[in-house]
Image (tube, rainbow, N blue to C red):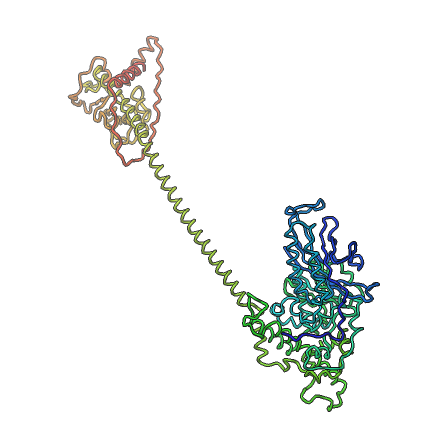
Amino acid sequence: MSVPLTPTNGTTPRLPGFIPLVCVVDFHHARGPEVEKWFGVDEGRDPAAEYDWTLLPFMALSDGAHAATEDFSYFTLLRPANEKESTATSLFGISCTRQLDASQLLNRPADVTRSTVQKAVVVIADSPQYFGVLRERLSVVTSAWFAQREFTDTEILRRFQESLAEEKTRGALSEEEDRDQYLGMSLRELVREFRWQTLVLLKCCLLQPKMLFFGTRCERLCMMQFSLISLIPGLLRNLQDSAGPDLDNYEKKLTQPTSLRTSDRNSLLTYMGLPLQIFGKGSLFGPYTPLQQLDILADFGTKSYIVGSTNSLLLQQRDRYSDILINLDEDSINITSTSLKAALQLSVADRRWIDFITQNVNDTWDEANPGRPKTLGYVGSEEFIRLQFEEYLLSLISSVKYHIHLTKHANNPRMLLPHIEGDPSLDYGQDFVDAWKRTENYRIWNSHTDSHLFDVVEPKHPCAGGLTIDDVQRRITQQVQDLHLDERFAVGREVLGRNLAAGKEKASTMFNKLYADMEALREAQRKRAEESKQQQSAETPQNGGAQQSVGTKASTFVNSWAAWAGEKRKAAGWGRSSTSTTPTTETHPASGGGGWTSGWGRGNKNRASLAPGGRSDGVTSPMLSPAPSITPGSGKTETYSLVRDRGSLSGESLFDATGTESGMSSPASPRRRPLSAEAKPLATSGIDNVVASEIAAKKQNGTPEPKVVEPKVAEPKIVEIQPEEKESPPLTPVPAAVAAAEAAEAQNAWGRT
């Protein structure tokens, strides 16, 4: 434990008559935040109106508090001088904000029109020193009050204020205890989060610029500022001038110490001029500052401040309201002032010192309990960090005092310390020392301290010395750690593995889909082939029936003609040989002949390709053999034949006329019968001469010549029938009755002709 501090000469005694106050701030749907009720004051009294605390509701209900179940806000209030209090001073407030669903209220007032009810319980005290303990009690009381779901019952709040007043009366709250470590965020978290920039922020506070902290979480925002100023020993006990730039009570009552007890730590700090009062004339401290307070920040009399805001609108005007911006959401520090940036450059010794603390914190870090080293030892603990900063500040002010002494006695070597080489203040940065000399806290410190402080504390930087190889290695190690290569590589490996897995899955899906598509295509082709086969098998009987029907009709037609020709032959004696030597009339094939045989000859398209007397190559008309040409003077008569289709009646001639050559006649065919009297002229003279003589006789008798109508024979169409694997079904024979009927019909048609 640290040695308890005793009051310094500049410490303003706490107001014995000020009793902690408790109030309730409500967010009205129409009027906005407003103070609803006070506890610890007389009935009908309103301290907000008496002290002109018009911004109290906006400080208690921070921007964005509705986004959290519970949030805390820390702020400062200026209590002006009046008849009872002759001196203006600063008061400090802490509020706990919670919200409740309006539907859960037991008795819902008529003015509650929103879906949620938001209220804050506020405690106002004269010092923030014990706010660390007070926060836990305030959280429990506020939670219990909201659990009642009846805000008209404020008994728990009244009793809470009475307990605070009782502790104040018996001095429990004003005991001289070292409570600095209980307020603010853990110093271990501060150092681990900002590392070497922690020292930059501390030195920035000593230069008293306009520091603006931004964060969406109000409690973390305020705790960060309290932790930072707690690094200056004794400052939390001397914030009586922090609420307004016009307050200057600390300097007015400050006196220079004349005695020192080296065995007493508090006496040592007082003699060395600590705390360095950074909140004096022209300065302001507002852990949470609402937008309604921006006019104070922009006031001409406000030279420096440390304030925090949760409203992002302030970021848009950071150049106007800040010299340095600390963004807690991004863990970044942005220095807008060029001169301030040069002054805050850490020296080699500074960097070596803060790296030493950072390494100890990182080596003893415990994620389960960040505020305590995992070794449970002293190194890296809260007290270790606090005493290291205390030593740094004592060495700083001692070195600066020695720097002033060197400047004053530069020409007198006997006035210099023999064991100190050169100017030790250079290890803190020459630009920083020069800038600090221009601040108000330096002026107050230098004017109220002894000029030979370097005789009490050695004027030397804790990590003095030039750059060494260890510093370079440590700096490189720290920079590598700052790059977070392990985290980036881990993330990269994770992303790469995830992408590879996704690519593998996509490729597998693609190949599976392709294989499925191919299988579906094959199945579709197989089905189409089966359907085609089924369709062909279904059509085959029909096509066979059609072909059989056509063949049957053709066979029937040829059979009918054959039957008719046979009857004619029997009746007229056609085909018998003639012994008559009647000269034969020659007919040239080009003229086409005339009469009946001429018509049959013209009906054949391929007669020029056939040999006389019958079929030579089998490519003939299924009905007739071609009419051969008769060579004049040959004395030979060719035979005209009517043949059956498909070999039927093959070798039998329907008309068989023979001629004689050199007065000889061919022997009669044994199958032929003797010609009748009517058929003899046909056999001797030919059918054309007989017909011509009959026509001439009819002309002489005056009988009109009948018109010969040549039947139009349709040209045969060649139908290509694809060969099939199966044998064609046998032709069905035509019934005899049908064949006889068709033959009779053909005979009648011939007779009419």
Q: Is 40 in front, or is 378? A: 40
Would residue 750 be found to the left or right of residue 282 on screen? Answer: left
Q: Is 586 in front, or is 430? A: 430
Q: Position of residue 592 (x, y in %)?
A: 32, 24
Q: Residue furthest right?
A: 83
Q: Position of residue 337 (x, y in %)?
A: 72, 69
Q: Position of residue 469 (x, y in %)?
A: 57, 80
User: Is the residue 551 above or below the residue 458 in the image?
Assistant: above
User: Is the residue 468 above or below the residue 102 in the image?
Assistant: below
How many labels, in total? 0
Q: Position of residue 397 (x, y in %)?
A: 71, 79
Q: Is the N terminus in the top left, top right, bottom left or bottom right quadrant?
A: bottom right
Q: Is 153 in front, or is 357? A: 153
Q: Name the residue located 75 percent from the left edge and 90 percent from the top edge.
A: 412
Q: Is 239 in front, or is 434? A: 239
Q: Is residue 319 visible?
A: no
Q: Name the residue located 63 percent from the left edge and 47 percent from the top edge.
A: 104
Q: Quadrant of residue 314?
A: bottom right
Q: Is residue 65 visible?
A: yes
Q: Name the residue located 49 percent from the left edge and 61 percent from the top edge.
A: 496
Q: Is the C terminus in the top left, top right, bottom left or bottom right quadrant?
A: top left
Q: Residue furthest bottom?
A: 414
